[in-house]
Image (cartoon, helix red, strand yellow):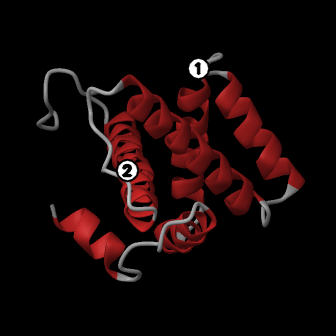
Amino acid sequence: MPFRTRPDQPRDLLSLVDAEVRERIEEAADFVSLDVMVQSRRARGLPPPVADNTQDRQEFEAGVIAFLERLAADLGEGLSVEHRRKLEDTASRVGSDRVGRLLTVQVALAKHLPDYWQQFDTIRMRHAEARGASGGEGRGFLARFFRR
């Protein structure tokens, strides 16, 4: 009996799991970028970002890339040379899309590291503080994010 999936989802279990993990990471990275923008603007007395503002959109996208790059760098520190090479090989199969490559690395890391989401949250807080945001509400981030 096949798994129940939406029409645009893969049909085999491993691909379905990868797609779900990728979707969660995309949403989390988007949330982090938006939260950092809102918090840092609030701290500087500036208005919040607006979805249809080109500059705000560019700042948001740059924030997503910056966070994914930091995540990859911080999570990659403890990996063996062989595992880092495997990650690079996996990412290279995606092509030249920068965000796609970064997300592919994160999916592989999420599957490899048993404490991926705990490390994600720690890195998120450090990233927010480095960007002039408070880091949000701390420990409640994952609970709020996954409760949707």
> What residue is drawn where x is 34% and y is 42%?
23
* Residue lying at the far front of the rendered structure: 45
The image shows residue 24 at horizontal and vertical percentages of 34, 49
Q: Is residue 19 left or right of residue 123?
A: left
Disc marking residue 34: 2
Q: Is residue 7 left or right of residue 18?
A: left
Q: Is residue 41 left or right of residue 114?
A: left
> What residue is drawn where x is 52% and y is 56%?
110
> What residue is drawn where x is 55% and y is 74%?
122
Q: Pick whichever, 43 or 87, lies toward us.
A: 43
Point out the tag, 2 or 1, that comes first from the N-terminus.
2
Task: Decide: is 34 above or below 56.
Answer: below
**Helix, strand or loop status at disc 1:** loop
> What residue is drawn where x is 57% and y is 39%?
65
The image shows residue 27 at horizontal and vertical percentages of 34, 47
The image shows residue 50 at horizontal and vertical percentages of 27, 37
| Label 2 crowd (10 A; few <14 / some 14-19 / many >=20) | many
Q: In terms of image quadrants, where is residue 99?
A: top right
* Residue lying at the far top of the rendered structure: 95
User: In which quadrant will I find the N terminus?
Assistant: top left
Q: Which residue is mark 1?
A: 97
**Helix, strand or loop status at disc 2:** helix
